Image (cartoon, helix red, strand yellow):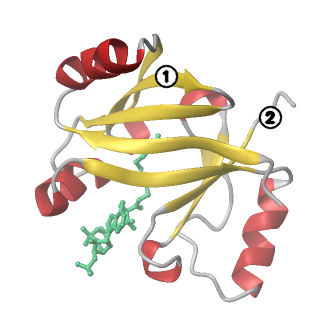
Amino acid sequence: KPSHIEHIGIAVKSLDAAIPFYEKAFGLECYAIEEVPEQKVKTAFFMVGQTKIELLESTDPEGPVGKFIEKKGEGVHHVAFAVENLAEKLVSIQEAGVQVIDKTPRKGAEGLNIGFLHPKSTFGVLTELCEDPSK
Ligand code: CMX
């Protein structure tokens, strides 16, 4: 089973507008800003215990976060669980009848291997599984 919630992804229109909220309201420090061109996003990370808040700004209106904001506005975009043996998990979860977006792991932010499950198959919540290859 997953060890913890690795991160919560929050779609925002502007990192520059959203980062100061997390800094001022909670005294959190933005420890990394990274562009992930394959996902058409720019990300900003805050650590809260073992879990990160990942702010997501779209770099392309046709990308997943651009389309999400257009349809639903800013808000919680996905929940990511930390798992081991991601490739096997993606196989077994499909065997259990869950629709996956990624049949095999791909590279995500922070060097993690990631795989997404389709929100239509997970009660409306886009769900990500992540594996830290350095562990
Ligand atoms: N949470 C819940 N539902 C979502 C969703 C989300 N984040 N994104 C899309 N949906 C829903 C839409 O509302 C829509 O529902 P309806 O059919 O009821 O209207 C349906 O899924 C299809 O949405 P769409 O706008 O037509 O978008 P697509 O089908 O083209 O893509 C999805 C949807 C989830 C397959 C795509 O966004 C995807 O592959 N996401 C995974 C990758 C990703 O999100 N990357 C960004 C984060 C990267 C990172 O963390 O580094």
Residue 133's mark? 2
User: Measuring 35% from the left and 13% from the top, which residue is drawn there?
Assistant: 23
User: Measuring 68% from the left and 61% from the top, which residue is drawn there?
Assistant: 104
Label 1 SS:
strand
Q: Earlier in the sequence, mark 2 or mark 1?
A: 1
> Residue 13, position in %: x, y?
17, 36
In the rendered image of this protein, does residue 80 appear above or below residue 103?
above
Label 2 SS:
loop
Amino acid type indicated by mark 1: Phe
Q: Which image quadrant: the N terminus?
A: bottom right
Amino acid type indicated by mark 2: Pro
User: Measuring 73% from the left and 76% from the top, which residue is drawn there?
Assistant: 93
Q: Is 4 left or right of 70, judged from the image as shown?
A: right
Q: How many marks?
A: 2
The residue where tag 1 is placed is 46
Q: Is 88 left or right of 99, judged from the image as shown?
A: right
